[in-house]
Amino acid sequence: MISMHFLITAIVVVLAPGTGVLYTLALGLGQGARAALWAALGCTFGILPHLVAATLGLAAVLHSSAVLFQVVKILGVLYLLYLAWQALRSGGALTISSQTKAQSPLRIAQRGALINILNPKLSVFFLALLPPFLSGDPGAATLEMSLLGAVFMALTFVIFVLYGYFAAQARHFVLGSETVVKWLNRGFAGIFAALAARLALERA
């Protein structure tokens, strides 16, 4: 049985703006609702390795291994900086422009998945988030963790799709002003860079 407390907690966590939300918004504004849908799907599946790690106890290994944590963190920082560059440069994958060409759905999803896969704090986060909502029965722990994780992923997908849909609705208004487009691209690049800096300061 999924408790109301877990649902509320999960919704609040998913609603909080982060790299996945930012990526979905950028795709919605830059390429429309279909691209945002694939972005949301990719970000959602990017959560899966961390949920599996938390369920199997591998997150504790990541948390206790400074070297492994640093390797994943550095890769995550570099990837976020790459996304910042993609938002800023002309013709970049995340650039908001009326001239932006449609990208492969699988490429969009892959990029979204990598955003979450390369965030080492997610495994530790799930290891802390899920156990308080378990029944306390050791024999049912794995099943319960899997169920809670599935619900969290479903909420992530639905909420991210809504974010992307509303961004896509604003697309035509945004593209009507070159000044707004220019500052949005700079803003997205700046936020991705700031998120990279914050991840760089994280410790295991």
Image: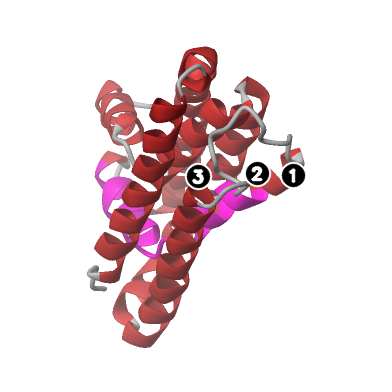
Q: Residues within 10 Å of mark 3 (few under 14, many from 20)?
A: some
Mark 1 → mark 2, Cα distance in angstroms: 5 Å
Horizontal side of 92 relative to 80 (left or right) equals right
Secondary structure found at label 2:
helix
Mark 3: amino acid: Ser
Q: Kindly check if marks 3 and 2 are in contact, taking CB atoms under 8 A apart as contact.
A: no
Asked if residue 58 shows in the view, the reply is no
Q: Which residue is mark 2?
A: 109
Question: Mark on residue 106?
Answer: 1
Q: Position of residue 30 (x, y in %)?
A: 57, 31
Q: Kindly check if marks 3 and 1 are in contact, taking CB atoms under 8 A apart as contact.
A: no
Mark 1: amino acid: Leu
Q: Residues within 10 Å of mark 2 (few under 14, many from 20)?
A: many
Question: Mark on residue 146?
Answer: 3
Horizontal side of 183 relative to 46 (left or right) equals left
Which image quadrant: the C terminus? bottom left
Q: Residue at x 66, y 43 (%)?
A: 108
Q: Residue at x 50, y 62 (%)?
A: 82
Secondary structure found at label 3:
helix
Q: Position of residue 131 (x, y in %)?
A: 30, 49
Secondary structure found at label 1:
helix
Of 14 and 107, the residue lying toward us: 107
Q: Kindly check if marks 1 and 2 are in contact, taking CB atoms under 8 A apart as contact.
A: yes
Per the picture, the main secondary structure of the magenta-coloured stretch is: helix
- Magenta residue check for 113: yes
Q: Residue at x 24, y 68 (%)?
A: 202
Mark 2: amino acid: Ala
**Sequence-earlier tag: 3 or 1:** 1
Which image quadrant: the N terminus? top left
| Numbered range of the magenta stretch | 110-132
